């Protein structure tokens, strides 16, 4: 087994460059480079480091952790050097010159931790999510995924209990009080939990990619003014001349810890001969397809048949999971709005020429964002959960205990993949190729 090393602390120059070493050579490397024999485990010490010609490389802090109680499960050492490019380069060269020592590949430390039984696959994926997290919500989701493995273990236990009940029914059917409907009730409970976990996963994925919020509506309804208020900035040009915004304009804001790309679009008019305006409208419509939240802005001057037509288009073009919010803007004018049939659609008033006038809109967007990205304590891979959910749904439809068992056993295989077991090397390659070097 080779010993691996990597610069784990990121881009240089920096205050400190942390090198991590893992493998059987860790202690010999520490001794050789420091020219000191005795290293007390887990004790950080100051030392000079030397190359093979006894020339100084740097002064550093260093520590040795004996396996198996380490991150990788192997002997490890860490070096805290001055964070310059030249120091890191020289140190890496000296390490590479030692026999059986080489630079680590992406995620190789974590891969070793996984192979040494230090981490479950959920923890590995959660750690990846943690390193990539940019917002508070993403950070919490990452810990949810690291904990997800424990939830998978519980699910597996419950499914095994159901199986044993079914085996009793198969073997002693006539002599026991157990009925198939008991087992079906238990399966239904687990299915409900799995479906909740799937929704949680989808929400976390949305949170990670960021949400798309699109402002849509007729010219002059106040879309650009709303964008500026929400962004606390003069991002878009606002004017009383209809058709000022001719192309989509995107800015990024955070709502409840989620990154949201807010898009202002060209005003929608039913008929136009202007080629540029028509292209702007086409682009606006395309934005609807990928939107998570569509804010349809209406104002007192909007005509009710135009509003109905635009709303029809929105419903046709939007994706099924996205939310529509009707924003009744220019509320300060205290004029009546056209009739809008808004059953099942959220409605909020706003006054986009003042910041306070958009407070209710901010709050409503906040609650829609929370619905799309629900808070969650556990995260498990939805693809495997869906496969398990399909099997359990089939099992519910069975009137035969033996066939029901077969479906539950298949479902269990997918859950087992979430906990440990059957993770293939190619799956691991896929995961670790996304990792940082030094992790
Ligand atoms: N009174 C009032 N005027 C507004 C409000 N929102 C926007 N406006 C005005 O309406 C005009 C059109 O606004 P704009 O944001 O450019 O609309 P857009 O074409 O939908 O982007 C501008 O003169 C704004 O100052 C509002 O809430 N109340
Ligand atoms: Mg505009």
Image (tube, rainbow, N blue to C red):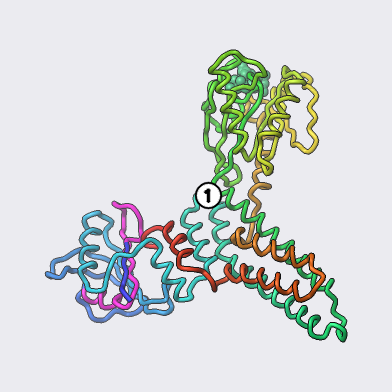
Q: Position of residue 33 (x, y in %)?
A: 21, 72
Q: Nearer the viewer, residue 235 or 435?
A: 435
**Residue 24 belongs to magenta span:** yes
Q: Position of residue 143 (x, y in %)?
A: 55, 61
- Dot 1, how many residues are within 10 Å of its Cα: few (below 14), some (14-19), or many (20+)? some
Q: Is residue 250 above or below residue 307?
A: below
> How far from the left and from the top, in percent, is residue 157?
67, 75
Image coordinates for residue 206, horizontal then vertical, percent = 59, 48
> Residue 17 or 355: which is nearer the viewer?
17
Residues 281 and 410: in front is 410
Range drawn in magenta: 7-32
**Is residue 355 left or right of 135 when viewed as pictured?**
right
Question: Which residue bears the numbered disc 1?
Answer: 135
Asked which secondary structure carries label 1, the reply is loop
Q: Quadrant of the C terminus?
A: bottom left
Image quadrant in which you'd find residue 25: bottom left
Q: Quadrant of residue 313?
A: top right
Q: Residue at x 76, y 68 (%)?
A: 187
Does the magenta segment cover residue 385?
no
**Rendering quarter of residue 152:** bottom right
Q: Can I make out residue 362 in this image?
A: no
Vertical relation: 299 (above or below) 59: above
Residue found farthest to the left: 53
Q: Which residue sits at x=62%, y=69%?
A: 415
């Amino acid at each position: 087994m080779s010993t691996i090393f990597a610069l784990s602390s990121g881009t240089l120059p920096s205050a400190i460059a942390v090198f991590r070493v893992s493998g059987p050579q860790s202690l010999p490397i520490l001794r050789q480079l420091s020219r000191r024999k005795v290293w007390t485990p887990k004790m950080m010490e100051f030392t000079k480091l030397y190359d093979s010609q006894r020339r100084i490389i740097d002064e550093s802090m260093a520590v040795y952790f004996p396996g198996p109680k380490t991150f990788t499960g192997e002997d490890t050492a860490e070096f805290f050097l001055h964070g310059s490019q030249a120091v890191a380069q020289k140190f890496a060269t000296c390490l590479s010159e030692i026999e059986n020592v080489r630079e680590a590949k992406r995620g190789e430390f974590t891969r070793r931790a996984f192979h040494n039984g230090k981490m479950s696959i959920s923890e590995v994926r959660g750690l990846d999510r943690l390193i990539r997290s940019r917002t508070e919500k993403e950070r919490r989701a990452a810990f949810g995924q690291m904990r997800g493995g424990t939830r998978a273990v519980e699910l597996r236990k419950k499914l095994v209990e159901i199986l044993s009940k079914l085996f009793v029914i198969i073997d002693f059917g006539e002599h026991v009080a157990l009925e198939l409907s008991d087992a079906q009730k238990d399966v239904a409970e687990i299915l409900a939990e799995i479906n909740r976990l799937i929704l949680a996963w989808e929400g976390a994925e949305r949170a990670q990619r960021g949400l798309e919020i699109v402002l849509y509506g007729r010219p002059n309804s106040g879309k650009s003014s709303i964008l500026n208020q929400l962004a606390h900035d003069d991002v878009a040009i606002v004017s009383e001349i209809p058709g000022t915004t001719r192309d989509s304009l995107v800015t990024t804001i955070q709502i409840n810890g989620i990154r949201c790309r807010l898009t202002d679009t060209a005003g929608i008019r039913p008929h136009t001969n202007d080629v540029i305006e028509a292209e702007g409208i086409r682009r606006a419509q395309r934005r609807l397809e990928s939107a998570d939240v569509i804010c349809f802005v209406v104002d007192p001057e909007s005509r009710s048949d135009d509003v109905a037509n635009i709303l029809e288009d929105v419903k046709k073009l939007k994706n099924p999971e996205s939310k529509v919010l009707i924003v009744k803007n220019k509320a300060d004018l205290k004029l009546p709005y056209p009739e809008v049939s808004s059953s099942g659609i959220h409605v909020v008033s706003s006054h986009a020429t003042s910041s306070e006038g958009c407070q209710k809109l901010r709050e409503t967007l906040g609650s829609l964002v929370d619905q799309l990205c629900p808070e969650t304590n556990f995260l498990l891979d939805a693809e495997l959960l869906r496969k398990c959910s399909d099997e359990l749904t089939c099992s519910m439809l069975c009137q035969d205990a033996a066939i029901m068992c077969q479906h539950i056993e298949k479902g269990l295989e997918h859950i087992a993949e979430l906990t440990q077991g059957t993770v293939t090397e190619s799956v691991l390659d896929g995961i670790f190729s996304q990792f940082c070097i030094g992790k």
